[in-house]
Amino acid sequence: MMPDILSKYTEIVNQRLQELLDLKNINPMIKDAMNYSVMAGGKRLRPTLNIMANALLSGNMRETLDIACAIEMIHTYSLIHDDLPAMDNDDLRRGKPTSHVMFGEAFAILCGDALLNFSYEVMMKNALRHASNMNSHIKAMLEVATGAGVYGMITGQCGDIENEGQILTEVELKQVHEHKTGAMIKSSLLSGLLLCDPRQEYIDALTVYGNNIGLTFQIVDDVLDIVGDTKKMGKTLGKDKTSKKFTFPTLYGIEKSMKIAEEKTEEAVNALKIFGPRAQELTDLAQFILKREK
């Protein structure tokens, strides 16, 4: 069931991304680099979360679609910069050579910068097209900016670098993961929901869901870095050990780490009960994140 759900949204997102990235009168190298990295593949998990959350309150998918695509651009920029020699120094992403391998380090940096800035252009133009709902769009854009910025992903990435070779407590490890991975997953959800002027109880419920699937995603990712298949994952495995990163498997081992992931998934699913049967796709998606193999 889940591959069909993901495929359905992936096709919609990919079509719109192709339209948005068909840019005119810009440097051809940066256009190629942007298209290469964004269209290289991927699960499109974050834009899918945005669209599914918007549907919980009967939102208009066409209204949230550009926000979903902007989130994928931000996610791709973060991967490009993560792979740079100064960061994780990786040469494989989504089963293909990384951006700096294909286009050189300078253009990879500029490509990441371009995607981040262009994502906000996309969201602002989208907001202007839906001016009657402008206040909700501003809230949604602020949510995305916060999740991607110094209060979210950037802080998590800083902690990830600073803590290499360090021994962390579970609390410290969770804090890194909540910012590095969880923040953008939560923002993907809330930015879709916020277009529908939701009650606070709906925001709170989806925040709990997002925080828990975000942590689950990172725990499973850390486990797959040890036991996964490079062909399925589309990236170099064993990087956590090489980089001396402290992970849940480092702290607890694989079996207990997956037990924690199962518990977090259950908490996430329970938080969705307020939405009733409308949340079935998000329930299924939580199970997919827990059981994924790539």
Image: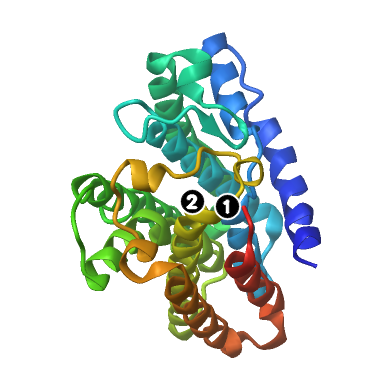
Q: Is residue 261 visible?
A: yes
**Could you say where residue 255 lies in the image, as x and y percent from the top left?**
48, 73
Residue that badge 1 annotates: 228
> Crowdedness of circle 2 by 10 Å Cα count: few (<14), some, many (20+)?
many
Disc 2, disc 1: CB below 8 Å?
yes
Q: Return the residue nearer the eye: 216 or 229.
A: 229
**Could you say where residue 190 lies in the image, as x and y percent from the top left?**
49, 66
Look at the picture and state if 44 lies above or below 191: above
**Could you say where residue 240 lies in the image, as x and y percent from the top left?**
37, 47
Look at the picture and state if 15 lies above or below 149: above
Q: Amino acid at mark 1?
A: Gly
> Crowdedness of circle 1 by 10 Å Cα count: few (<14), some, many (20+)?
some
From the viewer's perspective, is 39 left or right of 265? right
Q: Return the residue nearer the eye: 126 or 256.
A: 256
Q: Return the residue nearer the eye: 78 or 263.
A: 263
From the viewer's perspective, is 264 left or right of 57? left
Q: Quadrant of the N terminus?
A: bottom right
- Say which quarter of the image contains residue 69: top right
Separation of residues labelled 2 and 1 (CA atoms)? 6 Å
Q: Who's the residue at 44% across and 13% down the image? A: 104
Coloration mode: rainbow
Q: Amino acid at mark 2?
A: Asp
Q: Who's the residue at 48% across and 68% down the image? A: 216
Look at the picture and state if 40 lies above or below 25: below
**Could you say where residue 64 lies in the image, as x and y percent from the top left?**
61, 55
Q: Who's the residue at 26% across and 56% down the image? A: 151
Residue that badge 2 annotates: 225
Q: Who's the residue at 60% across and 55% down the image? A: 45
